[in-house]
Amino acid sequence: MTDTRPAVTFDEMRDLARKLPGPDLEAGTAARERERRLTKPAGALGRLEEIAWFMACWQQRHPPQCRHPRVAVFAGNHGVAVHQGVSAFPVDVTKQMIANFRGGGAAVNQLCALADADLRVYELDLDNPTDDFTAGPAMTETGCAQAMAYGMMACDQGLDLLCLGEMGIGNTTVASAICTALFGGEAEDWVGPGTGVDADGLKRKADAVARGIAANKAAMTDPLEVLRCVGGFEFAAIAGAILAARLARTPVLLDGFACTTAAAVLWALDPKAIDHCLIAHVSAEPGHRRLLDRIGRQAILDLDMRLGEASGAALAINVVKAAVDCHAGMATFDEAGVSGKGS
């Protein structure tokens, strides 16, 4: 049967990004008030207090909870990896790793089990990679926008937290190209070893990024065009999932360099577009720390991880659970009969 549905467009996505709801400040105020009365010195739980407040604001409820987290991994393949030798692994590994996820054998499976999180894996036409961006745009507008729409399906109603990540050989090269296009600098400023390329491989990555920027410079007129020209299907899907989560009032945990780069496309459209997102961890990939500095974000964890596959986001679920459980479960000074400061 022929698909007669109208094609999704960037204009629709831009319009959606202009209409995103804000935080629930009443729930946030309630969280601040309860935090002030808990049996501890003010600020003693550090960022856990801020995470509890964040969760209340974006879940639109107090107290917040984290009983139903989901980890969504988006997988895509890249023409630049097929043709330019930018990865230590062949693109076939993307599909092989998806089978590993589904068989329960990857790191993310173990971390999701630890966090009692629902794992979903979304493939984006792995047999048909994007075009090689060193020769022109990686995607058509329709293909890119449809990938964004596909990603939006990852956010069901009833989720307490949506954790996003990716799998795709060559995606650190793609992330480096997007960041160079969005934020400037030289390709060498953004590229890193990825899955473990040697010095020659690093030069090939930087050269591919520089050629990709040059080949698409005239077409990259706004952040979504950057995504289309030098991005990938899984990057677009992550951006779509972030938009859907905002509409559903679902807080988001972003994984490493590639995932944060997908979010940075939305940030470049409007810095408030990712206010409902926390950065789970800072990757060992050097471009990630540079990107976090550029968008003014601090990661929850810093463990020199660089695996991808939402592993850092899945691990950080446990920190979010700790934050909301302490917030909701601790006694207040009055309840515990403990004298407060100045009593």
Image (cartoon, rainbow, N blue to C red):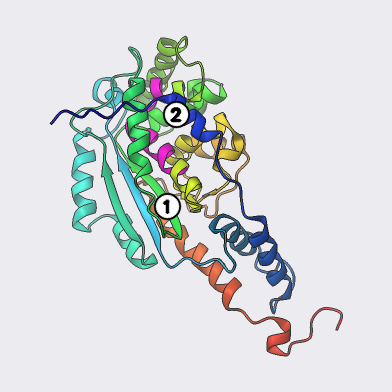
Q: Which of 268 and 14 is in front in this view?
A: 14
Dot 1: element: strand
Closer to the observer: label 2 or label 1?
Answer: 2
Q: Where is residue 301 in the image (x, y as percent from the top left)?
A: 52, 55
| Residue at point 49%, 38% (across, down) | 263
Label whose residue precedes the other's in the sequence (2 or 1): 2
Disc 2 versus disc 1: distance between alpha carbons?
A: 24 Å
Q: Nearer the viewer, residue 331 or 97?
A: 331
Dot 2: element: helix
Q: Position of residue 313 (x, y in %)?
A: 43, 53
Q: Where is residue 69 in the image (x, y as percent from the top left)?
A: 41, 60
Q: Which amino acid does label 1 sit on?
A: Cys
Q: Position of residue 285 (x, y in %)?
A: 45, 39
Image: magenta residue range: 227-242
- Number of other residues with Cα within 10 Å of mark 2, as a class: few under 14, some 14 to 19, many 20 or more: few
| Residue at point 49%, 50% (across, down) | 281
Q: Nearer the viewer, residue 5 or 124?
A: 5
Residue that label 2 marks: 12
Q: Main secondary structure of the magenta part?
A: helix
Magenta stretch encompasses residue 239: yes
Residue that label 1 marks: 163
- The part of the image, by quadrant, that contains residue 226 is top left
Residue furthest to the bottom in view is 337
Q: In the image, 142: left or right of 38?
A: left
